[in-house]
Amino acid sequence: MLFRSNKSHSAAYALVSYQTGWLKAHYPAPFMAAVLSADMQSTDKVVHLIEACRKMGLEVLPPSVNQGEFRFAADGTQRIIYGLGAIKGLGEGPVAAIVQARQHGPFEDLFDLCRRLDLQRVNKRALEALVKAGAFDDFDRNRAGLYAAIPDAVRAAEQDAANAASGTVDLFGGPGGPSPAAVVSRRSVSPWRQRELLQAEKETLGLYLSGHPIDEYEAELRGFGVRPLDKLQPDKEPQLFAGLLVAQRIMKSKRGETMAFLTLDDRTARIEVSLFGELYAQYRDHLVKDEVLVVEGTISHDEYSGSLRARARGLMGLDAARARFAQALELEVTADQFREPGWVAELEALMAPHRAAGCPVVVLYRRADAKGRVDLGASWQVRPGDRLLNQLRERFGAERVRMRYH
């Protein structure tokens, strides 16, 4: 009887495996949408499944108030629309209210959505979560502007409801559009930087969807000579790699020695990195969550998990890595910029707080008929951190400021 029971189980599992494999091969988008929906309350599983979608050539779109459902759904192509129910702070009630309201047509903007919704079911906190998750990107991609406009939109909707109840016509706003002041207020808000936008996604979705914080450093990391995590191979020789610190565990060994286990993510893969004893004490101040770490360590195969693991021999933050590997900070200046009064004094003032021995500064001068290179003296050397680079890019243009590596 035991043998027959095992045989029947094997046949049943084989049939299920065949059916799921066939569905995955022939209907990949609906299949993965169903799998994501089944695990939508587990952020860790959703992260791995979305990466699996990308490797299958499937695009996972942000949530959408005009297209999304409570669960993940395929849109009829090779794309999957993120489930509104997977947004943190948004339950079944608000999602049902959104889906019901849009039966009369797609929402035109945030103000239209607020007018058509029961704001007792979709409150201000839910609207904030929708904006941060990108659910309004269909009609407005300035999430910062939308976020700032939520109070105006709610007030306009409440005023419209009160006017309708009393039979009053509002001469300045009224049905069909927000007040002029609200429109100006929304448009005057600068868009979030990429890192702020991604952090908002992480807060509401539990993951980075439209990009990855490490993307903006990709060219620099190649300049350092790091290898992507999915290209690492077991080797006793140390290798250089980098990733975003997404998790860490601190433990004590039986001998009382402190050790840390870090999880690094570079979007291609994740890897666990161990630091022991003195090494942990030396580098613990660098272990800041959601910051990029550059690690030198040995890679081995973890027989328990079946994945790779690393043992660190040293690690650096991004600023320290720039200082170690940089050949120069290059600043391209046009003839028009060079003629601006006080240009040199302004440049000196920008760089003064970041002066430090190590990274030379080079000015590349260009005009229509000539170009030249000026290597600034040792007194101009800097520590090239994010703050300095962002200030220079805002002043001179992102394409005119770059790090040169050996």
Image (cartoon, helix red, strand yellow):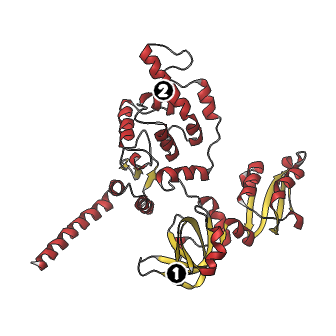
- Camera sees residue 406: no
Give the secondary structure at mark 2.
Answer: helix
Question: In whole angstroms, how far apart are the C-alphas of marks 2 and 1?
Answer: 59 Å
Q: Amino acid type of disc 1?
A: Ser
Q: Which mark is residue 215?
A: none
Query: With respect to residue 73, does 224 lie above or below?
Result: below
Q: List the residue tagged with mark 2.
A: 157
Q: What residue is at 65 percent from the left and 41 percent from the top?
A: 190
Q: Residue shown at 49%/47% (left/top)? A: 133
Q: Is residue 241 left or right of residue 388?
A: left
Q: Residues within 10 Å of mark 1 (few under 14, many from 20)?
A: few
Please state, as top left, top right, bottom left or bottom right, where the N terminus lies in the image: bottom left
Q: Depth-wise, is mark 2 or mark 1 nearer the camera?
A: 1
Q: Nearer the viewer, residue 333 or 175?
A: 175
Left or right: residue 217 compared with residue 334: left
Element under label 1?
loop
* Residue 253 image label: 1
List x then y, in percent, for residue 249: 52, 70
Q: Is residue 167 above or below residue 311?
A: above
